[in-house]
Amino acid sequence: MHEFHLPDMTCGHCASKVSVTLKLVDPACEIEVDLAQHRVAVKSTEVRETLLEALTDAGYPPG
């Protein structure tokens, strides 16, 4: 399980974009979003760096 703090994820639209981004990288991943804490947990077979790069490219760099 990979956890990321995404300070720029502030609304439902942001959370949706983050989820879509992660699913593009790994369609089989499982995602848990905590919008209030700006956190996302991802269960994925992809390496952390790949997920981090995808989130950054989508405009949600982990902080």
Image: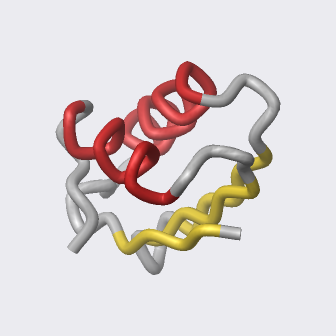
Task: For the C terminus, give its image quadrant.
Answer: bottom left
In the rendered picture of this protein, how many numbered marks are placed on residues?
Answer: 0
Q: Could you say where residue 57 lies in the image, as x and y percent from the top left?
A: 20, 33
Residue 40 position within the rendered picture, expressed as x and y whole percent measured from the top left: 54, 63
Residue lying furthest bottom in this view?
A: 37
27 over 29 or under it: above or below: above
Of residues 43 and 50, the one nearer the viewer is 50
Quarter of the image where one finds residue 4: bottom left
Q: Position of residue 52 (x, y in %)?
A: 35, 52
Q: Give the residue at x 29% y 43%.
A: 53
Q: Residue at x 81, y 31 (%)?
A: 28
Would residue 48 appear left or right of 29 to someone viewing this image? left
Instruction: Give the image location of residue 11, x and y in percent.
Output: 38, 49
Q: Residue at x 71, y 69 (%)?
A: 1
Please indicate whether residue 15 sits to the left or right of residue 11 in the image.
right
- Residue at the location (47% across, 44% down)? 15
Examine the image and state in which quarter residue 50 appears: top left
